[in-house]
Image: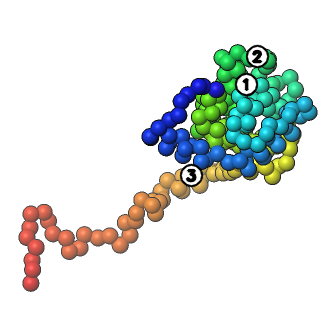
Amino acid sequence: MANRGPSYGLSREVQEKIDQKYDSDLEQRLVDWIVAQCGGNLEKPQPGKENFQTWLMDGTILCRLINSLYPRGKEPIKKIPETQMAFKQMEKISQFLQAAEAYGVTTMDIFQTVDLWEGKDMAAVQRTLMALGSLAVTKDDGQYKGDRDWFHRKAQGYRREFSEEQLRQGQSLIGLQMGSNRGASQAGMTGYGMHRQIM
């Protein structure tokens, strides 16, 4: 973690607002899912934002998590080195983020590496993991492990097919959001420049 002194003024207010978004109940659900998904020899951290950050910070657990969502042999991160070097750990976090985006997590839901590494926005880390869990439940490809009620299923597209005849008919209609010209007439209108007659 970065060694920083206390923040003051606007910086402090902004950080406090970011910290308020962190959800302790969600943390416990995410820890339970990660342990169930990664399997066996993974120890749960003590409750608390700092412990959750420390648990995920080296990137190893995140890499194991994303790999467990793929069939054996098709894992996106081939080698997960155990290392204490900071830049290598940050590189593993970046690899996880790239793999999560390739899995289908939207760019808006992806956290930045420093959000986890420096603990700047742990709520964003939770948001990414929630989006990943929801996608895993939605894909329903047999790779998800854990309680399906932990995450909501994402809405699937409802594709509609129209015949050429229906498409041609739709071109001749004026949609109501564009307005209507029914009942419109120019009766009673006068030409430009003429005075209005008042009686």
> Which marked residue is nearer to the observer: mark 3 or mark 2?
2
Residue beneath disc 2: 83
Q: Is residue 118 left or right of residue 58?
A: left
Residue sticking out furthest to the bottom: 199
- How busy is the neighbourhood of tag 1: few (under 14 within 10 Å), some, or many (20 plus)? many
Name the residue nearer the viewer: 71 or 30. 30
Where is residue 47? Give x, y as percent: 76, 43
Residue 40 seen from this side: yes
Residue beneath disc 1: 58
Amino acid type of the residue that numbered disc 2 sits on in the rendered structure: Thr
Amino acid type of the residue that numbered disc 3 sits on in the rendered structure: Leu
Residue 5's label in the rendered image is none
Instruction: Write down the quadrant of residue 4 in the picture.
Output: top right
Residue 167's label in the rendered image is 3
Q: Is residue 186 above or below residue 33?
A: below
Quarter in which the N terminus is drawn: top right
Q: Is residue 62 above or below residue 198?
A: above
Q: Earlier in the sequence, mark 1 or mark 2?
A: 1
